[in-house]
Image: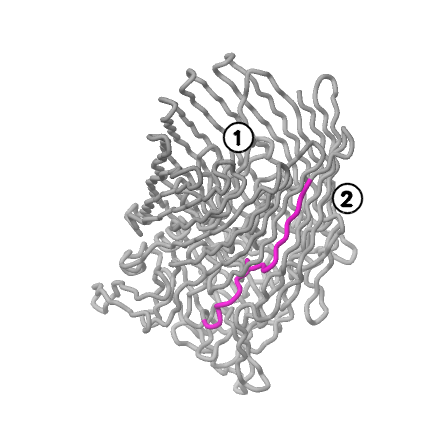
């Protein structure tokens, strides 16, 4: 079929899955399962968890050719799987056999076949994103060899991949900035299978998905002539991936008893650096009176330097025991130690991040300070906000789980699955002390199947109910429980700008402006590891979701089968940081519940206090997904096959989940959702991953003996549109993105609840391929052409939703500008030779 050669593209064929916000996932598309955020999925390879535990955004990147089988679990999965409230992507790698095999599989996607996208414009007619000159090209070549080392006993499969990707694109909202991005990395993979005897085996899997993305940025790009000027302004280097090694033992002690043991390690580099990080400060311009682009500075990029690496050490055992004729007992344990080493800071010689504003007198700043009326006439005041951030530390989380499941064949018609899983998490701070510990999270997994055909699997009614817990990502440890110094100060702006760096010209030795301070330094974090009892609710509960599914599958004949199901997923408890306004502190808690913390006193002691839910004013975290799904399958008969699904669904709530698509925030577990009570006013509505109608159809047709045709058709509703403002009738939160805009004519706020501004257009996409197969020199030759979005549809999939800039009532010309279109038409040429 014409799909991108990665496991996420396979998952997108499953019912109810959609591509998540394009700002997540680095170099891959991430998936939303059943209304969940893209950070709530679990990825397994050969039984080893390879999920990104820092923030949940994806898993290990492995070439398509290295896999032999995929299993996409969209819901209702057994007690064996946990730490997911989204979906499970379970893959198995290839093994060697007694026959030697070798070959090459290569693909080429020329940039000349990339049709580009329309330009997008601001409301004032100025260009916002110069998409039409964007280009992307890629080639991949996989070489593999497999066979016996010792016949009948020891086998190997080895794969080496070379690949090169090039992307050229303009910076959104700064069309005079051009990016030239390259990725040239090799992949190494090895699988060794040792059949010790007929009953026992060892399987060693090793691969390295280390990769580096280099992006040269040019500030002097002329989009009219499509030319860059002189040398690049800066080079950003993103380091990702790492080495993965796991060893699995499987023993068959009888026809009824099977035991497997697995130990593994995987590493994930998480580094973002820039060639000018020591010279160029971060600068954002929200003052329309200052002649600078929105992303200013001598690099032309927003630079948060992050250095660090994650490492997982995992051990698990699984047992299957058919202890009676009609009972299959499955039980096991998995234990992970997930370590994070991180250091991140703002770029620049002083580590200061400057942001220019034009604010109305009386606008609220930090700690009750307001913008003074320095002009004396009520006109807007030019101000500059500085922030300083430095965070570092080594963090560890221990995750343990036990599960027990009995698959009970009651009679020829009825099968019951009675399972339970117990999750335990221990997140530690930068000193190695327990930061959050939640034990004995009991997750029942119950299922029933009634086979009307009494064992022939032709007509089945089924139901599942399960509870699914999500572990607290290590990102939360690093942000809340590390050595973090994070400050904010507000100054009047004297108008002087350094022409070389775009930073304020008049600054002191620490990089702070010398103009009048209008809001003294505020410490979000003071550089010390906080006492856990002051930042974590003593009664915090885990994040979990309940799901129930009822469905019916029917085999019409030997070729056709159909199914219908209803799915309900409801978030029962969320975790996020909220501000306790009385003490001006952020506390990790379950929003909408009372909070018990220790509060610093004037004499330096700590006193425990409980703040009721009514005092705090925050609603509970809410998210509910309901769906009706219809599926059909016409099996391959040597001539043609057809599969598909239609999903009618709704996802609504006041939170998306671990991450936030509203602002592209991948700060898993501590988004801005509940930072202020005012940000929750109007937050309930259709979530960013809500798509009411979703249709997927794909199939293959053997036109001639040597020529096969394939196609994939998808249709989906658009994404809900919001109108975010900066102010609120009660206060003016400094983070913005409220659900209000200010009407300058009436002097009143207008309410725009979540999703009330319509939707982006519905998307239709058709992919097509032709595959020619023949024999060559005793091997199998395959030539293929894949054309994606063959009709070159150009519908927008995401728009800019901030309607105000600088201060409430000041219209943002970027509002409703198109940020992303659906992927343009492109083509991929492929050739494989297998012996």
Residue 301 shows in the view: yes
Picture disc at residue 112:
2
Q: Residue furthest top?
A: 151
Dots 2, 1 in contact, CB < 8 A = no
Q: What residue is shown at x 74% (from left), y 28% (from top)?
A: 773
Percent across and percent down for residue 434 are 28, 49
In terms of sequence position, does the residue under pointer 2 or pointer 1 come before the other? 1
Give 243 or 820, whichever is nearer the viewer: 820
In the displayed structure image, the side of residue 782 where residue 258 appears, left or right: left
Judged by depth in the image, the label closer to the viewer, 2 or 1, is: 1
Magenta region, residue range: 681-699
Q: Kindly report the distance in space between the C-alpha atoms of the residues bearing marks 2 and 1.
A: 34 Å
Residue 619: name its quadrant.
bottom left
Give 73 or 759, whichever is nearer the viewer: 73
In the displayed structure image, the side of residue 574 where residue 640 appears, left or right: right
Q: Quadrant of the N terminus?
A: top right
In the displayed structure image, the side of residue 601 where residue 5 appears, left or right: right
Picture layout, residue 595 above or below residue 747 = above
Q: How is the image coloured?
A: one colour
Q: What residue is shown at x 61% (from left), y 55% (from top)?
A: 694
Helix, strand or loop under label 1: strand
Q: What residue is shown at x 49% (from left), y 47% (from top)?
A: 461
The residue carrying mark 1 is 93
Classify mark 1: residues with Cα within 10 Å, few (<14), some (14-19) or many (20+). some
Q: Quadrant of the C terminus?
A: top right
Picture layout, residue 76 above or below residue 171 = above
Picture layout, residue 45 above or below residue 172 = above
Residue 643: in magenta span: no
Picture layout, residue 258 above or below residue 88 = above
Classify mark 2: residues with Cα within 10 Å, few (<14), some (14-19) or many (20+). few
Helix, strand or loop under label 2: helix
Residue 695: in magenta span: yes
């Amino acid at each position: 079929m014409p799909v991108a050669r990665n496991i996420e593209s396979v998952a997108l064929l499953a019912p109810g899955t959609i591509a998540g916000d394009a700002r997540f996932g680095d170099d891959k598309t991430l998936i939303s399962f059943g209304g969940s955020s893209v950070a709530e999925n679990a990825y397994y390879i050969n039984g080893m968890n390879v999920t990104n535990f820092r923030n949940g955004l994806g898993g290990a990147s492995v070439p398509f050719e290295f896999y032999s089988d995929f299993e996409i679990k969209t819901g209702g999965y057994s007690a064996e799987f946990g730490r997911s409230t989204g979906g499970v992507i379970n893959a198995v790698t290839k093994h060697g056999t007694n026959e030697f095999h070798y070959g090459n599989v290569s693909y080429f996607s020329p940039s000349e076949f990339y049709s580009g996208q329309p330009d997008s414009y601001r409301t004032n007619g100025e260009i916002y994103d110069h998409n039409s000159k964007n280009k992307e090209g890629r080639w991949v070549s996989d070489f593999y060899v497999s066979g016996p080392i010792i016949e009948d006993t020891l086998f190997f499969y080895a794969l080496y991949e070379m690949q090169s990707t090039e992307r050229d694109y303009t910076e959104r909202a700064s069309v005079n900035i051009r990016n030239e991005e390259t990725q040239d990395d090799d992949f190494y993979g090895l699988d060794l299978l040792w059949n010790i005897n007929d009953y026992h085996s060892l399987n060693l899997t090793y691969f390295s998905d280390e990769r580096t993305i280099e992006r040269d940025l040019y500030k002097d790009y002329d989009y009219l002539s499509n030319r860059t000027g002189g040398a690049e302004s800066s080079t950003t280097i993103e380091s990702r991936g790492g080495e993965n090694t796991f060893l699995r033992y499987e023993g068959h002690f009888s026809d009824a008893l099977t035991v497997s043991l697995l130990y593994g390690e995987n590493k994930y580099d998480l580094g973002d650096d820039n060639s000018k990080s020591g010279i160029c400060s971060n600068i954002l311009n929200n003052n329309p009176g200052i002649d600078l682009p929105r992303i200013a500075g001598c690099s032309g990029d927003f630079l948060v330097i992050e250095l660090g690496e994650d490492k997982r050490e995992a051990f698990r055992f699984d047992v299957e025991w058919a202890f009676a004729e009609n009972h299959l007992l499955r039980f096991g344990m998995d234990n992970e130690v997930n370590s994070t080493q991180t250091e991140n800071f703002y770029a620049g010689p002083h580590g200061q991040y400057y942001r220019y504003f034009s604010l109305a007198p009386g606008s609220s700043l930090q700690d009750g300070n307001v913008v003074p009326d320095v002009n004396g006439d009520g006109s807007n005041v030019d101000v500059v906000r500085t922030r300083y951030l430095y965070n570092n530390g080594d963090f560890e989380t221990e995750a343990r789980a036990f599960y027990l499941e009995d698959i009970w064949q009651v009679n020829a018609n009825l099968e019951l699955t009675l399972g339970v899983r117990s999750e335990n998490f221990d997140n530690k701070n930068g000193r190695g002390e327990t930061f959050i510990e939640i034990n004995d999270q009991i997750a029942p997994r119950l299922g029933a199947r009634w086979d009307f055909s009494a064992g022939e699997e032709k007509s089945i009614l089924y139901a599942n109910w399960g509870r699914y817990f999500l572990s607290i990502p290590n990102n939360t440890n690093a942000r809340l429980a590390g050595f973090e110094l994070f400050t904010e100060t507000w100054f009047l702006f004297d108008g002087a700008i350094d022409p070389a760096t775009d930073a304020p010209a008049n600054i002191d030795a620490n990089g702070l402006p010398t103009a009048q301070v209008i809001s003294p330094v505020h410490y979000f974090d003071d550089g010390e590891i906080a006492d856990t009892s002051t930042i974590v609710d003593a009664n915090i509960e885990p994040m979990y979701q309940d799901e129930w599914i009822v469905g019916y599958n029917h085999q019409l004949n030997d070729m056709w089968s159909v199914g219908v199901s209803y799915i309900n997923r409801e978030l029962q408890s969320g975790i996020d940081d909220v501000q306790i306004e009385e003490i001006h502190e952020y506390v990790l808690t379950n929003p909408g519940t009372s909070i018990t913390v220790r509060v610093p006193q004037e004499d330096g002691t700590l006193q425990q206090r409980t703040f009721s839910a009514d005092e705090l004013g925050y609603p509970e975290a809410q998210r509910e997904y309901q769906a009706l799904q219809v599926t059909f399958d016409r099996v391959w008969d040597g001539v043609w096959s057809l599969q598909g699904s239609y999903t009618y669904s709704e996802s609504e709530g006041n939170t998306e989940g671990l991450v936030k698509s509203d602002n592209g925030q991948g700060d898993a577990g501590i988004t801005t959702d509940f930072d202020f009570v005012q940000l929750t006013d109007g937050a309930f509505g259709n979530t960013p991953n809500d798509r009411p109608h979703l249709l997927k159809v794909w199939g293959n047709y053997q036109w001639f003996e040597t020529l096969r045709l394939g196609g994939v058709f998808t249709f989906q509703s658009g994404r809900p549109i919001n109108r975010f403002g900066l102010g609120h009738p009660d206060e003016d939160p400094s983070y913005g993105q409220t659900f209000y805009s200010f009407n300058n004519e009436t002097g009143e706020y207008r309410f725009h609840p979540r999703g009330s501004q319509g939707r982006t257009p519905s998307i239709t996409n058709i992919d097509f391929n032709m595959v020619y197969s023949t024999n060559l020199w005793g091997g199998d030759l395959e030539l293929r052409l894949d054309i994606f979005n063959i009709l070159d549809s150009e519908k927008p999939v995401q728009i800019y939703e901030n309607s105000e800039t600088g201060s409430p009532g000041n219209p943002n010309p970027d509002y409703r500008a198109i940020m992303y279109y659906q992927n343009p038409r492109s083509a991929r040429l492929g050739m494989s030779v297998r012996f």
